[in-house]
Image: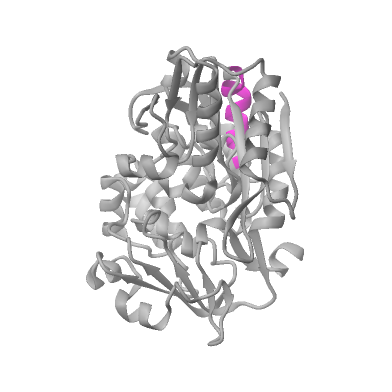
Amino acid sequence: MSTYIAHGAQDSIISTEEKKACIHEALLKLGGIPKKILVIPPDITRLHSNAGELTRILYELWDSGNGQAFDILPAIGTHAPMTGEHIAEMYGKLPNAVYHEHNWRSGLFTFGEVPSEFIREVSAGKLDYSIPVAINRRIVEREYDLVISVGQVIPHEVIGIANGFKNVLVGIGGVEMINKTHFLGAVDGMEKLMGRTDTSVRRVLNYAHSCYLKQLGIIYIMSVMDVDEDGERIMRGLYIGDDAQTFEIAAELSRNVNMNFLDAPLSKAVVYLDPREFRSTWLGNKAIYRTRMAMADDGELIIIAPGLREFGEDSEIDRLIRKYGYRGTPATLKAVENNSELRENLSAAAHLIHGSTEGRFKVVYATEHLSQQEIESVGYEWMPLEDVLALYNPRTLADGFNDDGFYYISEPGQGLWALRTQFNG
């Protein structure tokens, strides 16, 4: 188990040439540029991860070496499959690449399970179930010289800090792994997990990797991204390895770069959801997840969501969200107890917990495609999109505090906002 590249710092700006040199160096350490590659990058919902450019660099290196197969399996998890337009926008033109679609409910290879006694231990007795370890069977059944996971290390609501083994075990994972790890994170408590690497969910994924996936020799390319003072996205760190330690090194930089600490709670926050990334509350609720630790009791969170068209990326999850709504943890846990359809879709139940403020602050969605009735039926408040845009214009607002006293966030998926005291005691 090795770290091949650990490049970056809080003030680094890593150029395209440096990225290519780092990836080339890592491949040489692994024996040279492989002929048959499977790349597992994130989908369009991680547009700002730089994974698109990193995938293109891998393709250029492979193509220059007279490669034989360059397959791409986007790690969509529960998200909707990528369209041709999304593929072109995310990865660019890769004429000889072949794209494959992951289905979290079928086409899986099961290695074994994370036993129930381990889940009882990491959940402090809150949960008692085993978790099958299943991923897309293409990795196991096709003969690749190298399988490469590409993604971004960033604070995350389910696992604490995303990427590493999560990109494979969840991104191309099976229904039970996704359902049960999401529910574990929700029951364990978001505030307890976010921004941290030693979490219950991370321990489950580390266990699954150690027992089952390590033998596959998957290489992980992980970015740490930031936004400069001109609003341009820049890479601060690039890490390549096949072990948990490589992820931990990257996560330490992400904590320094992507976590935004405030000295006082926010009474009003305004968050913009890029319509290219956010079409559902399943994704768009990052506006809630990533700000909840900073919001004041009785505060107001206004979410500008021009691309929002649905609640769930998956039709069944969309139906469950519409039926049960974001009613808080006690109501959701009771619904799970009383309804088999939620017990069979625990990631949906977890999402309902994540998306609730537990009555602590108000959420107002400004939408065009989802109606007032639809938004209010799941437990949020609503305003017309055009009215909110007249008050808060994303083209003119600067991230952070604005003159009227509200706090603006243009990319909620790129960070975590919290009170300094929540991490410093």
Quadrant of the rendered structure where residue 54 is? top right
Q: Residue at x 71, y 41 (%)?
A: 248
Q: How is the image coloured?
A: one colour
Q: Which residues are magenta?
A: 202-215
Location of residue 324 in the rendering, given as x and y in whole percent from the top left corner: 31, 59
Location of residue 49 in the rendering, given as x and y in whole percent from the top left corner: 53, 47
Q: Is residue 81 left or right of residue 53?
A: left
Q: Residue at x 53, y 21 (%)?
A: 64
| Quadrant that contains the C terminus | bottom right
Q: In the rendered view, would you say 231 is above or below 157?
A: below
Q: How many marks?
A: 0
Quadrant of the rendered structure where residue 405 is? bottom right
Is residue 43 visible to the viewer in this orientation of the structure? no
**Magenta region, mostly helix, strand or loop?**
helix
Q: Residue at x 38, y 56 (%)?
A: 278
| Quadrant that contains the N terminus | top right
Location of residue 89 in the rendering, given as x and y in whole percent from the top left corner: 39, 45
- Residue 387 shown in magenta: no
